[in-house]
Image (cartoon, rainbow, N blue to C red):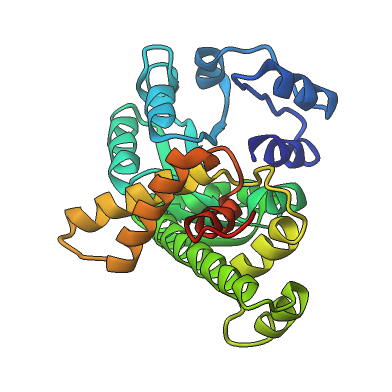
Amino acid sequence: MGLPMAKNLVKVYDTVYGLNRSKGKEELFAQAGGKVGLSLPELAQTADVIMTCLPLPEDVHNVYFADDGILANGHPGLVAIDFSTVSPDLSQNIYAAASEKNIDFLDAPISGGPPGAEAGTLSIMVGGKEEVFAKVKPVLEVMGKNIYYVGPSGSGSAVKLINQLMVGIHTQAVSEALVLAKALGLPFDKVFDILNNSFAQSRIFERHYTQFIAKDNYEPGFALELLHKDTNLVQELAEKKNLNLPVGQQVNELLREAKSSGYATEDMSSMYKFIQGKNNQSL
């Protein structure tokens, strides 16, 4: 999602640098008018705003805390914004360490997937100092349509995990509903039309069915292993608060099982295939 977000920034701002582990993505960014060639320490020393969008919490930790990372090299007055899905604890740890160096940090996880990133219509939920949020809101508005200041550091990350809990549960509901519909011999398109205009409707149902299941194409828009990473974070957060989330816990375990069964790198909608297989139905 980082590349289309960065491309949108290039349309508005004259100087936007991109840095990616995949140099092929950097080349695509340069072709779109972006600038490349600076290292992370160089960017931290010179940029006004640095934005990170990374798949795993350990990636985020390393980019911020490594010797060649943002905090060790950032200058006072730098604003760092992390769009990744991580725990509130990690966001708060980065915020505290950044504050010691007079660097401002916002946790600003995103929702909307690659289509939202390309269209600039992402939902962005932000935690940190409200005055810093107000300062960079025009930048966020280039990438997002629904932008919310939630509260202190970690608040954005917390809301994103709640979102992912519901995404996981909705994904499981869609999978089980369609497996049942297939077993009953019902026409999928008609079932979708009916349910999509009834109380069973959800954006996840519409996404999973129209973009993946109906096409029998599970090239990932959002990989199943990433959803499992997120539901794991949800469970860790619930345990920290001494909460029992029984459905969320069961969905997390099913995602773990699906990940181990060969669906890790397929789209999260492939839970439909996994549940179908568990019921010994033909794929």
Q: Quadrant of the C terminus?
A: bottom right
Residue 108 seen anywhere in this rendered image of the structure? no
Relative depth, front residue between 161 and 15: 161
Quadrant hosting residue 182: bottom right
Left or right of 113 on screen, residue 262: left
Q: State the image coordinates of residue 9 (x, y, percent, origin top left).
A: 72, 39
Residue that sits furthest to the bottom in the current view: 198
- Classify 188 as above or below 11: below
Q: State the image coordinates of residue 102 (x, y, percent, origin top left).
A: 36, 31
Relative depth, front residue between 130 and 192: 192
Q: State the image coordinates of residue 264 (x, y, percent, origin top left).
A: 51, 39
Left or right of 136 on screen, residue 62: left
Relative depth, front residue between 130 and 266: 266
Residue that sits furthest to the left in the current view: 242
- Classify 216 as above or below 187: above
Give the residue drawn at x 60%, y 42%: 266
Give the residue drawn at x 56%, y 74%: 180
Q: Quadrant of the N terminus?
A: top right
Give the residue drawn at x 77%, y 31%: 14
Give the residue drawn at x 40%, y 47%: 257
Residue 193 seen anywhere in this rendered image of the structure? yes
Relative depth, front residue between 188 and 15: 188
